[in-house]
Image (spheres, rainbow, N blue to C red):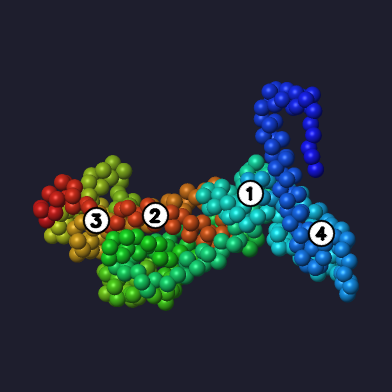
């Protein structure tokens, strides 16, 4: 078919474009949608021709199936938008096109893009509002949620992956709470997290599992799951954690060769919570003297000074420190260049902070499966950042640290 257009029509088109240049792109999109729709319709017509074994109006003996018109269908294509196609039919109903996926209204790459934007920080309702501009068709927040369902299998594969090839020596463990929709109500659900450190100093998120962080049995189940997935428990030499009830004893039972390092930040908070406001700066300074001593002997000496100075005036604070002191100084048994990383659970706290930052726009997480998708995505992002900052590597090049190690 030959397309003919006269000069006055061209002149009128250019006048419209000059008055509103953005109309040019609208016209281009309309033409592109029409071309794409016709192209897909033509492909499906040829599909039906091959299915029937003859062209339109061609008759062959013994053939009883025939064309039976078509029905309209809308389909959204990445970079094009929503197009209208005509899907041909046969009288026997045996024809099924492979050009367009059955029961799908948009192509697979759009579902992947929506999933990545969801993981990156946009809520399903925000994506729903932006969907017409993003892909050329309005999607409900329910449709967007369904588009992310395909991530579930990938996330589960990551959560349950084999750990037998990972040479893990240290474990950082902690829990984080999320407001999660469970059934018809919203509850605060804790998720247990374990980060492992390899012998090369690289950090990996090993376990993410819903469970009561105050429950010893929940932690035991998580540790046993890690070992069932191939984690060599005999290699574990240290566990860094805060004072969660039952956690320390369960950890020692499951990893008998490992020592326990209590997070100095958590212990300091517990001690300072029992101190009057006016003397908190003085007590905090004395705690820093203990925790940042250049050797365990000097730390114990500073702790004795602490008891002499504060035991009578602040007995509760002094007793709190005494109960946790030994486990706060475990890091002294490990290489000095790793001390800065082994004193606290800052590594896992940073991960938990990223978890909460990503969840904040959503306010409520839509169930455990949705929570795992987000946490898996954030964990993998953090692991990429960690690759350039392994524990204990390169820190001895710092002059002040060299001096520090010489003093000890």
**First in residue order: circle 4 vs circle 1:** 1
For label 3, the SS is: loop
Asked whether disc 2 touches disc 1, contact meaning CB atoms under 8 Å apart, the reply is no
Disc 2/disc 1 C-alpha distance (Å)? 29 Å
Task: Give the residue furthest to the left.
Answer: 407
Give the class, few, some or many, for how many residues have Cα within 10 Å of label 2's Cα (few <14, many ≥20).
few
Going from N to C along the chain, the mark reached first, 2 or 1, is 1
Tell whether 174 sits left or right of 279: right
Frontmost residue, 31 versus 342 = 31
Identify the element where label 2 is drawn: helix
Q: Which residue is mark 2?
A: 384
Residue under label 1: 78
The foreground one among 389 and 358 is 389
Quadrant in which the N terminus is drawn: top right
Neighbour class for label 1 at 10 Å: few (<14), some, many (≥20)?
some
Q: Are marks 4 and 1 in contact (CB under 8 Å)?
A: no
CA gap between label 3 and label 2 equals: 16 Å
Q: Which residue is mark 3?
A: 393
Picture layout, residue 370 above or below residue 401: below
- Seen from the viewer's position, the closer of residues 92 and 130 is 92
Question: In x, y percent, where is residue 343?
Answer: 27, 57
Residue named by callout 4:
88
Nearer mark to the viewer, of 2 and 1: 1
- SS at circle 4: strand
Which residue sits at x=64%, y=53%? 144
Residue 30 location (% of width, % of height): 73, 40
Q: Is residue 381 above or below residue 261?
A: above
Determine the CA span between mark 1 and mark 3.
Answer: 45 Å
């Amino acid at each position: 078919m030959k397309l003919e257009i006269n000069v006055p029509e061209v002149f009128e088109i250019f006048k419209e474009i000059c008055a509103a240049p953005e109309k040019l792109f609208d016209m281009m999109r309309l033409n592109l949608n029409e071309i794409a729709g016709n192209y897909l319709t033509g492909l499906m017509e040829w599909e039906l021709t091959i299915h029937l074994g003859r062209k339109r109006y061609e008759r062959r003996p013994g053939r009883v199936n025939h064309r039976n018109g078509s029905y309209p269908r809308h389909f959204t294509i990445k970079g094009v938008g929503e197009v209208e196609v005509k899907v041909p039919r046969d009288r026997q109903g045996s024809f099924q096109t492979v050009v367009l996926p059955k029961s799908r209204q948009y192509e697979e790459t759009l579902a992947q893009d929506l999933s990545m934007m969801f993981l990156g920080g946009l809520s399903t309702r925000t994506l729903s509002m932006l969907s017409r501009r993003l892909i050329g068709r309005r999607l409900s927040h329910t449709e967007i949620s369904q588009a992310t369902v395909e991530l579930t299998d990938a996330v589960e594969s990551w959560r349950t992956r084999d750990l037998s090839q990972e040479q893990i020596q240290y474990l950082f463990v902690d829990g984080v709470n999320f407001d999660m929709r469970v059934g018809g109500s919203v509850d605060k659900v804790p998720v247990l997290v374990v980060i492992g450190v390899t012998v090369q100093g690289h950090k990996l998120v090993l376990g993410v599992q819903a469970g009561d962080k105050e429950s010893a049995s929940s932690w035991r189940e998580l540790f046993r799951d890690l070992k069932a997935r191939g984690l060599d428990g005999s290699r574990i030499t240290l566990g860094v954690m805060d004072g969660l009830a039952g956690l320390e004893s369960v950890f020692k039972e499951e990893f008998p060769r490992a020592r326990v390092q209590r997070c100095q930040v958590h212990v300091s908070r517990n001690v300072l919570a029992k101190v009057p406001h006016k003397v908190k700066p003085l007590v905090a300074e004395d705690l820093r003297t203990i925790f940042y001593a250049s050797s365990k002997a000097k730390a114990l000496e500073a702790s004795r000074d602490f008891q002499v100075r504060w035991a009578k005036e602040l007995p509760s604070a002094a007793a709190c420190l005494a109960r946790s002191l030994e486990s706060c100084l475990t890091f002294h048994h490990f290489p000095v260049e790793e001390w800065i990383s082994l004193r606290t659970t800052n590594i896992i706290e940073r991960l938990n902070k990223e978890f909460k930052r990503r969840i904040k726009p959503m306010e409520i997480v839509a169930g455990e499966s949705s929570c795992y998708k987000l946490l898996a995505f954030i964990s993998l992002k953090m692991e990429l950042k960690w690759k350039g900052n392994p524990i204990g590597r390169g820190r001895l090049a710092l002059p002040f640290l060299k001096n520090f190690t010489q003093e000890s």
